[in-house]
Image (cartoon, helix red, strand yellow):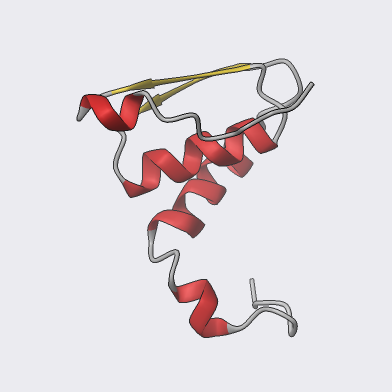
Amino acid sequence: MPLPDALDPVAFMGGGCGLPTGFHAVERAGIAMGDTVVVQGSGPVGLNAAIFAGLAGAAAVLMVGAPADRLGLDLLRRQV
């Protein structure tokens, strides 16, 4: 899929491989509002997948892996 004209390719590259791979995983999984998602691994791909799962509407996103400081991140600051 080509990048939209408004998106600077250099800015997009900052996401590296983890950004498009995490997005693709969530898209393929068909995550919907209210789903519970488990992400195995807290590396760049896992962190991006967790963020995109939350943005897709997952009610809960659980991450399994290490290091502990990554597992405790509040990746989506939701205001209710």
> As drawn, is 63 to the left or to the right of 80?
left
Camera-side residue of 74 and 42: 74
Residue in the image at 37% along x and 23% along y: 72
- Residue 58 versus residue 19 in the image, above or below: above
Residue at 66% over, 23% down: 58
Is 5 situated left or right of 73 in this image? right
Query: Residue 30 appears at what percent x and percent y?
Result: 66, 33
Give percent across and percent down for residue 37.
53, 20
Quarter containing the N terminus: bottom right
Q: Residue at x 47, y 56 (%)?
A: 19
Image quadrant holding the C terminus, namely top right
Q: Quadrant of residue 54?
A: top right
Q: Position of residue 28 (x, y in %)?
A: 59, 40
Q: Quadrant of residue 63?
A: top left
Picture layout, residue 51 above or below residue 66 = below
Number of on-image labels: 0
> Where is residue 74 shown, x and y percent of the image?
49, 29
Q: Residue furthest left?
A: 67
Q: Nearer the viewer, residue 47 or 39?
A: 47
Q: Residue lying farthest front?
A: 79
